[in-house]
Image (spheres, rainbow, N blue to C red):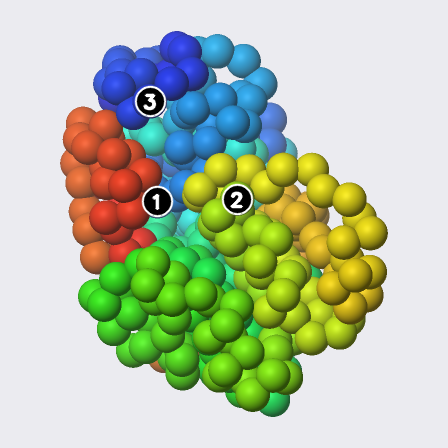
Amino acid sequence: MVKAVVVHEYGGPEVMKIEDVEVGKPGPGQVKVRNKAIGLNFIDTYFRSGLYKAPSLPFIAGNEAAGEIIEVGKGVRGFKVGDRVGYVSSLGSYAQERLIDARILVKLPKKISYETAAGMMLKGLTAQYLLRQTFRVKRGNVILVHAAAGGVGLLLCQWGKALGATVIGTVGSKEKGALAKKAGAKHIIYYKDENFVDRVREITKGKLCDVVYDGVGKDTFPASLDCLKKRGMFASFGSASGPIEAFNIGLLVQKGSLFATRPTLYDYADTPVRLAAMARDLFSVVARGKVKIPVNKRYKLQDVVEAHKALQDRQTTGSTILIP
């Protein structure tokens, strides 16, 4: 038996319970992983609250971790006992050990620690597809990153700068502004004190942005569209303030023939080959120091309720991990 965080009903952080669970033996195509560090992400709160529906109740929470393979099932190729791996899965990571499909594992390079991997698998791969696929950022682009001091936000700032873009970041406090600035945001907007649309117009001298990366949702829409130049891209990848309500698609015409998309990692990393290529790109920029993964807070697995409260209250910056 191992410890895991189990959700029996949707609700607030208090619905998560630490329980003993039986892991069992890996089936064909599966491996058993002993998690060494577990990532904490906003999507975890969406599943816990019921905003995103789990396949069934009860379920083990969590969507990413890094650890060591301790058992291999039949038919698994390319992995063996003792391999260091990271993964993003649809639920099940908030546990000391778990079974997982080997197809969604990636091997960790020696330079990538378990904590670094757990703090970046979901957020880092999200940044990869946003910057390199959803809208392929290139030198000279101007990008707006909402919640620039958050887990994904800090990676977008660093990686965006490394790609040669001018990064504008919105944050809620001076402390978070300093973090985003250090990460690569050239301009900081304090959304509680300033109208971010007016500030974007001022900063860009009316030229506006090529792309807006928005993990906030309700509170920043539709104003984000006013930050885009003609044929610009609005990429919504999260709903920290609540989901964006349905809107008339004609709004995109009114704002300048804009593009709007709501991408998800699972549609980009939908095969082992694509996942491996994305991971190589991510690991490369981290290993070369172009992108740093700040693990700013660590919680014990049994303190997961406290961790979720801090995440929801936007008290966290960078990556937060659970130690099983």
Find disc 2 in the rendering and name its residue. Answer: 218
Find disc 1 in the rendering and name its residue. Answer: 39
Q: Residues within 10 Å of mark 2 (few under 14, many from 20)?
A: some
Q: Residue at x 37, y 74 (%)?
A: 188
- Residue 191 to residue 166: above or below: above
Res 248 quadrant in image: top right
Horizontal side of 227 relative to 176 (left or right) equals: right
Please name whichever residue, 60 or 202, is drawn nearer the observer in this view of the structure. Answer: 202
What amino acid type should be assigned to the residue bearing mark 2?
A: Lys
Residue 252 rendering spot, x and y as whole percentages: 77, 58
Residue 93 rendering spot, x and y as whole percentages: 39, 33
Horizontal side of 151 relative to 207 (left or right) equals: left
Q: Residue at x 46, y 61 (%)?
A: 146
What amino acid type should be assigned to the residue bearing mark 3?
A: Gly
Measure the alpha-carbon separation of dots 3 and 1. 19 Å
* Disc number lying in front (3 or 1): 3
